[in-house]
Image: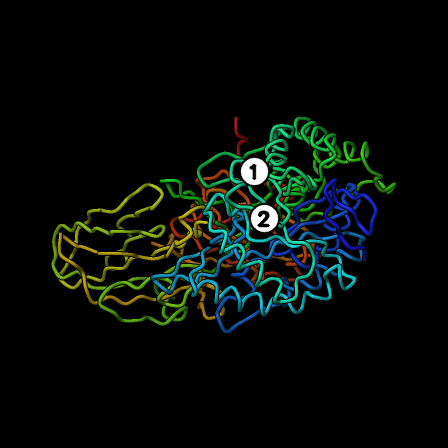
Amino acid sequence: MPLLQIEDDGFRLDGEPFRFLSGGLHYFRVHPDLWRDRLRKARLMGLNTVETYVPWNLHQPRPDEFRLDCGLDLPRFLDLAAKEGLHVLLRPGPYICAEWEGGGLPSWLLADPDIRLRSGDPGFLGAVDDWFRQLLPPLRDRLATRGGPVLAVQLENEYGAYGDDTAYLEGLAELLCRHGVDVPLFTCDQPADLERGSLPGFLATANFGSGSARNLTALRAARPSGPLLCTEFWIGWFDRWGGEHIVRDAREAAQELDDLLATGASVNFYMFHGGTNFGFMNGANDKHTYRPTVTSYDYDAPLDEAGDPTEKYAAFREVIAKYAPVPAESPPARGARFAQGALELTESAGLLPAAPALGDAVAYRRPLTMEELGQDYGFVLYETDAPQAGPGLLELEKVRDRAQVFIDGQPVGVLEREGHEHALTFAVPRPGAALAVLVENQGRVNYGQGIHDRKGLLGQVLLNGAPLDGWTSRPLPLTSLDKVQFAPSPATTPTGPAFHRGAFAVDRPADTFLHLDGWTKGNAWVNGFALGRYWSRGPQRSLYVPGPVLREGVNELVVLELHAPGRGRRVALREAPDLGPVEG
């Protein structure tokens, strides 16, 4: 495999001039059985490189656990890229942003109340050292210096938007080199942050989605010589719950690409194929108001969430052909689809009654955070007794992120971090009534100082002005639903959160989209595979089901509905998604 050289006048690959024509493709957002398909489509669009982040929180879910299996088999993904004739830009963090839960930082770091993330804090750097020690040795043979596809490795990620600690960046560079990375290292920042986030002696690159001439001028001002690379050329954007689906005109984006390539610069599309925030892995933003990201990471990219070419695919391919050869093969056609009309979920199980089978309660004088419980994602059920009957004013100092409150199992209100809500009133029917608070982690903040985002109930809990003590905190990570005891659904809709289960037959597995018309909020699983969150708040109103998740014959669908299921507990599997009304 050729070696990348960084010269004053640009990139060279084994001495020959080279331009990155790259696209973002996150292996962890795509079912592993579909990696080969997505990589082939990248090559057919004219790309010579793919870029991927590496999520620390998935690969090292606990300090003593490291995973490179199944959908986290990064060596296999890199090998498939090489077989497709593609180079790789690798971005191992430790922080990745990516609209991903916590920016990729594992939640167990936050169990230390004093930790300073993305800094020279010895506790943080020690954890990073261990992360690189386990991640990088299996990848060494995939570096270009050993004949692999990885041409360059990113150092941190948009650090200039967070801090300016050069010693921290130098420490990370030393760790990468110590653990065997001997290909070029690079940083990436938005143009205004280049000075803060770059490191002397290493390639600096810029992120932007328009105004190529202006932004490349800023990059050239920061680095008078060397290659020009836009590491994140934003050709779309992500959606948040309660917003609209964001799209960008394909012709406008193609013209911006043409303008960029005309300068001679290299490019990496963010994203070429966005994929999906399966399970509980979406991130969030908090710029004075908490805003969680939706499940779909479609990103209005050249390949849509199901991997089909969009209008942008053809438009970008046409532009790329002006500057580099593109394969003569025809662009790929739309993939096969599976659909089924109304599907009734005929079995149910209340979440609160099922909770003891899903997690062990921990008794303590106050509610414990998820991090104190050693929990990453999902829900925590907090329980105590209300000491007196009568009117009750419940005050929760910090809700992280959404709390449903129950008295003797009956729902009495919801408090949302997004709405800056902290208090609600209700009637306590009797002394010693059971008070329960179900708190959902809706995604840890992935950008800015808010990444120190601990989940659950934080701070004081007051009832009628007096502290409530004597709590149990029960983690409900929902990593497995095997212990949930289902029964035939009652004729009346159950009160409060409940699981609903149904079965459907498949003759030929193919991609499909789960539509939950009339349902309110929750999560869904097909054959145990966590599809992600749904919410009637929108904009997203369907969940992508990858074909490889289905099997010939009988398949199982489980939906956790936190409020009220759709009429008849019916859902539908359709050929097309509904990502919501378009912005503007």
| Mark 2 or 1, nearer chain start | 2
Along the horizontal axis of the image, is 338 left or right of 284? right
* Front tag of 2 and 1: 2
Indicate the amino acid at tag 2.
Answer: Pro
Q: Is residue 470 above or below residue 196?
A: below
Q: Position of residue 492 (x, y in %)?
A: 37, 53
Q: Is residue 546 above or below residue 334?
A: below
Along the horizontal axis of the image, is 178 left or right of 8? left
Indicate the amino acid at tag 1.
Answer: Trp
- Name the mark on residue 237: 1
Q: For numbered disc 1, what is the local secondary structure?
A: loop
Q: Residue at x 46, y 71 (%)?
A: 483
Inspect this view and state whether residue 98 appears: yes
Pick the front one: 509 or 296: 296
Q: Is residue 442 above or below residue 176?
A: above
Q: Position of residue 357 (x, y in %)?
A: 40, 71
Along the horizontal axis of the image, is 69 left or right of 43? left
Marks 2 and 1, how far apart in space? 31 Å
Say which quarter of the image contains residue 577.
top right
Badge 2 vs badge 1, beta-carbon distance below 8 Å: no
Residue matched to label 2: 200
Pick the front one: 357 or 295: 295
Q: Position of residue 574 (x, y in %)?
A: 62, 44
Q: Position of residue 264 (x, y in %)?
A: 74, 34
Q: Alpha-carbon neighbours of circle 1 within 10 Å: few (<14), some, or many (≥20)?
A: some
Q: For numbered disc 2, what is the local secondary structure?
A: loop
Q: Residue at x 44, y 46 (%)?
A: 448
Q: Quadrant of the N terminus?
A: bottom right
